Image (cartoon, rainbow, N blue to C red):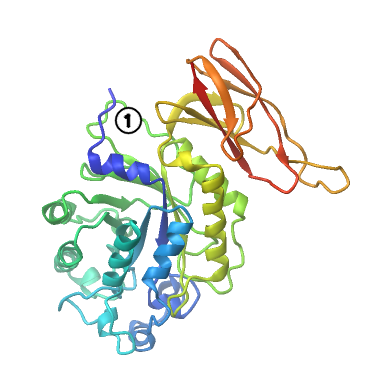
Amino acid sequence: MIPVPEKRIADFEKLGFGMFIHYGLYSLLGKGEWIQCNGRIPEEEYRKLADKFTAKDFDAKKIARIAKAAGMKYITLTTRHHEGFSLYDTCGLSDYDAPHAPMCRRDLIREFVDACNEEGLLPMFYHTTLDWHVKEFNDDFKTYLKYLRDSVEVLCTNYGKIGGLWFDGNWSKADADWEVDELYATIRRHQPDAMIINNTGLGAQGEIGHPEIDSVTFEQGRPSPMDREGMPKYVAAEMCSTINDHWGVGYGDFNYKSLPELIEMLCACRKVGANCLLNVGPTGDGAILPIQQCMLEEVGNWIRTCGKCIYTGKPSPIKGDGKNFALTDGVKDYFFIHDLGIFGQAHVTVAGNGEGIKHFSGVKNKVKSIRYTDNGQELEFIQKFDELFIYAPACDYGTNYVVRVAEADYE
């Protein structure tokens, strides 16, 4: 038997698409979020970056508008990454934070939460559990865990209602007692409706790990279907991915995913009911790079044109051939059709023409009509018992939707 999801988890699943933001002192160096470790920068040298941290172009309202235009429903921001520098007022726990940085003097998390609330987006807090800055992490782990819990309590009590906490770093000490019962109890005490997520990393994708976890993670990997049969609790799933190869900004990283890759990645996540959390790495001054903003806007255009059903659609038992699949909202089924290409004169058409009959099995209801969601074009089809054969035309010259969606009405 599959358990019924708690409301916060059901609501989280409906969000579908979110923005991940990695921003910190490492952004000033432009070589990724692990530069302190990978570059073997001494702590006393690295912490001097706080004196240069201005965040002068960190515009939370603009970032929220970019996310909204991309069709994203929530944002997960690094309140503190592994370097130990916080973007929030730690209220006396440390002076290694944005409000104490002499050229910043701002609580960026306050600005972030306010901007999300204004735009109707759910604010989520990433928070590291490992820390390269605090010596107690290695010398007195129990004392460090108290500092971690106190830091999380600040986030849970000073910013109003939040969407959840997204932890990362327990994999750094796989055999240690992280006292997660106490950590998660702190969250439940102050934010009972918050999602609790703890990233299991590249090596343990999809693992749950603790009964309080509300969503598993798939870091940089396509999510697999969740087998919730017999689970004591319904758990959601979320894939997080970089837009190139780094979480923090990498000025020399030109290996961007293509726009079709991003569209297909979002579709692959929703196929199995997982959320897609797509990362951007702001510049050292806090601005979203133009290329990243433009790519997000185009994903948003695809959602508005073809894929509004990604929010309400759930995985369907209907099976398609190849990459094709279906979602259902309980009233309609939505058929996601890949690689149709475009129709046009042979001398100018390079994308090819993949139109033809697309086969889906497991269609239990009697189909009355099928149409493309982008232009309302009625499609021809034949249904034989639970087998459905849809004639799917290619995109007209001047368009190429990468993944085209057709919706079916039933008798």
Q: In the picture, residue 251 is in which quadrant?
A: bottom right
Left or right of 147, for residue 231? right
Left or right of 22, for residue 127? left
Q: Position of residue 56 (x, y in %)?
A: 40, 82
Name above or below for residue 2 compared with residue 154.
above
Q: Position of residue 70 (x, y in %)?
A: 48, 56
Viewer-closest of 379 and 205 = 379
Name above or below for residue 1 compared with residue 25.
above
Residue bearing the label numbered 1: 228
Q: Position of residue 49 (x, y in %)?
A: 38, 85
Q: Position of residue 116 (x, y in %)?
A: 33, 62
Q: In the picture, residue 38 is in which quadrant?
A: bottom left
Task: Residue at the far right: name it.
Answer: 347
Q: Amino acid at mark 1?
A: Arg
Q: Residue at x 18, y 53 (%)?
A: 180
Q: In the picture, residue 328 is in which quadrant?
A: top left
Q: Is residue 138 visible?
A: yes
Please state, as top left, top right, bottom left or bottom right, where the N terminus lies in the image. Answer: top left
Q: Residue at x 81, y 42 (%)?
A: 344
Q: Residue at x 55, y 61 (%)?
A: 244
Q: Residue at x 62, y 55 (%)?
A: 258
Task: Residue at the far left: name it.
Answer: 189
Mark 1 packing: few (<14 Cα in 10 Å), some, or many (20+)?
some
Classify mark 1: helix, strand or loop. loop
Viewer-closest of 319 and 80 = 319
Viewer-closest of 202 and 316 = 316
